[in-house]
Amino acid sequence: MDIVDLSNGNILAYIGDSIMTLTVRQFLVEQGYTKAKQLQEKSTSFVSAKAQAKVVATMLDSGFLSDKEEEIYRLGRNYKGHTKAKNVDVLTYKMASGFEAIWGYWHLCNNPQRLKEIWDKTRMIVENSIC
């Protein structure tokens, strides 16, 4: 990718946030959810900072992420931005940003296969934590 600096954790997280959100929304619609309130509640279980931090912590603990993904995670997590976390502590917010950076990285590198693997693992972690 010539246009995007793949070492900018903020940009990777920014792109990753939208890619993950779109993936979750598409999944929920495919599952038959149609009411706005339902869609919002269900999507929050995937895209909230708390949910993302839990997912990435589980992935890190289980060794699911590659060395490159852990590097990208740290880039997103450690970015020194001026955005303040809403409704969560700073560490949770930074972990979520790191997770979004992984999504952004693979999207910009045009690797839908790895995105699908990360999505499948994310879905499994979230669904297991709800039950």
Image: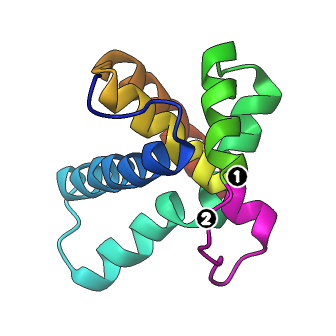
Which residue carries the number 2 mark? 49
Q: Residue at x 32, y 18 (%)?
A: 111
Could you classify mark 2 by the number of other residues whose Cα lies within 10 Å: few (under 14), some (14-19), or many (20 or more)?
many
Q: Is residue 110 above or below residue 17?
A: above
Which x, y percent locates residue 71? 68, 26
Which residue carries the number 1 mark? 95
Q: Residue at x 41, y 19 (%)?
A: 114
Total count of labels: 2
Q: Is residue 95 above or below residue 110?
A: below
SS state under label 2: helix
Rendered image quadrant of residue 18: bottom left
Question: Are the residues tagged 2 and 1 within 8 Å (C-beta)?
Answer: yes
Q: Is residue 87 above or below residue 118?
A: below
Q: Which residues are the magenta region? A: 80-94
Q: Residue at x 51, y 47 (%)?
A: 100
Which x, y percent locates residue 22? 27, 53
Marks 2 and 1, the one that precedes in the sequence? 2
Could you classify mark 1 by the number of other residues whose Cα lies within 10 Å: few (under 14), some (14-19), or many (20 or more)?
many
Q: Residue at x 44, y 37 (%)?
A: 103
Q: Measure the alpha-carbon separation of dots 2 and 1.
A: 8 Å
Rendered image quadrant of residue 90: bottom right
Q: Amino acid at mark 1?
A: Met
Q: Quadrant of the N terminus?
A: top left
SS state under label 1: helix
Q: Amino acid at mark 2?
A: Ala
Which x, y percent locates residue 123? 49, 42
Magenta region includes residue 92: yes
* Residue 43 in view: yes
Rendered image quadrant of residue 99: top right
Viewer-closest of 23 and 95: 95
Magenta region includes residue 73: no
Viewer-closest of 23 and 92: 92
